[in-house]
Image (tube, helix red, strand yellow):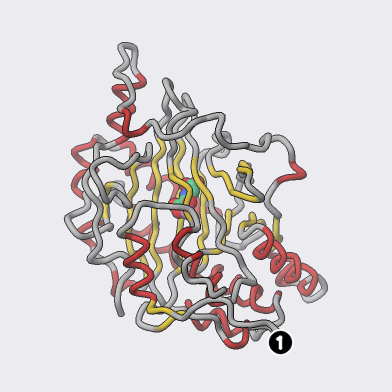
Amino acid sequence: MADAARGMGSLPVANVQALAETCNNGVAEPVPRRYLSKDPSAEEVVAADDSSHAIPVIDFRKLLDPESSEEECARLGSACHRWGFFQLINHGVPDEVIANLMKDVVGFFKQPLEAKKECAQQADSLEGYGQAFVVSEDQKLDWADMLYLIVQPRESRDMRFWPTRPASFRDSVDSYSLEASKLAYHLLEFMAKGVGADPASLRGVFQGQVRGMRANYYPPCRQAADRVLGLSPHTDPNGLTLLLQMNHDVQGLQVSKDGRWFPVQALDGAFVVNVGDALEIVSNGAFKSVEHRAVIHPTKERISVALFHFPDQDRMLGPLPELVKKGDRVRYGTTSYQDFLKQYFTAKLDGRKLIESFKLE
Ligand code: OGA
Ligand code: NI
């Protein structure tokens, strides 16, 4: 099996957690120009307290309950079509599994730089501690560090990049990635049902395939929070992404809809789930891979963990016949998923540009 993001690298950049410490302290260093990318007045952000504009909330318990399943499946299908994003409550992943993961991810980032560097990325690999999508010396940079690991299946792991401290880190990631994967497969079944397809159809594309975990560390930026970006606007290249956020009081994730940015107020204990490019293609556009970004808080750090479910990377990816609705046409080209990923990881993040190029008009 080919492995997501192996053999593809990113140019080395400064450690942003360390940089932020020098920029945020009393005798502040100016924030380097390469991080100042955003014109705060250029794009409209919808007020965070306007709940009528919030991404939909889906109740996993209602999906499971025969009494309510059909209705909730339809809501799920509509959320994935209209927003490409939803929050999932009552998801059944044990609190303890999530709490252990969070504690150990926070513990990893809290270590001194030298300790974290034991997991540093190496040339030609995105796994490890560092940053992704840096392809030129003059592009704008994101105000964040990341730790990226291929976490499932177990035989795909490259333990060189896996932290040994906190001591429970590896076990926590193991349990979490198994539990969250089970949930994701279940969700894919309900998503297929939601558009009237065989529940096994979508699940079959993703089950047992590679899952990558990206832990994001977004330091505060006292001087210029409104001019830096934690994560540039992008779509995820995979199928389904499950996102956890550690600090619910710090708003960061924003989702694009109708030309405006909608802040996501992460609910305590919920997952933020989103559709990635592979799922948009496989579903022939029934589900949308929507552009999103992360903004930075002036005084508070934020940590998030994304779990990406990839499709089989050795096969050609195109709309599944079961998901092309009667009377509809095939809307996306079929492509080798390896080629798709290569294009994705060797360019700067650029919204929906790549997925748009696979649309047939
Ligand atoms: C990602 C992502 C958002 C966040 O890692 O792909 O979109 O809030 N993260 O960290
Ligand atoms: Ni993303």
| Image: 180 above or below 338 | above
> What residue did someone put label 1 on?
326
Residue appearing at x 54%, y 74% in the figure: 185
Q: In the picture, which quadrant includes the C terminus?
A: bottom right
Q: Looking at the rendering, which quadrant does residue 140 occupy? A: top left
Front-most of 113 and 77?
Answer: 77
Name the outermost residue toward the front: 361
Please state the horizontal and vertical placement of residue 89, each as a whole percent of the image.
Answer: 66, 56
Q: Is residue 100 left or right of residue 57?
A: left
Q: Is residue 118 left or right of residue 291?
A: left
Name the outermost residue toward the right: 67
Front-most of 121 and 40?
Answer: 40
Residue appearing at x 43%, y 24% in the figure: 224
Q: Secondary structure at mark 1?
A: loop
Q: Is residue 39 visible?
A: yes
Please state the horizontal and vertical placement of residue 244, each as a whole percent of the image.
Answer: 51, 51
Q: Looking at the rendering, which quadrant does residue 90 occupy? A: bottom right
Three-letter amino acid code of the residue under disc 1:
Lys
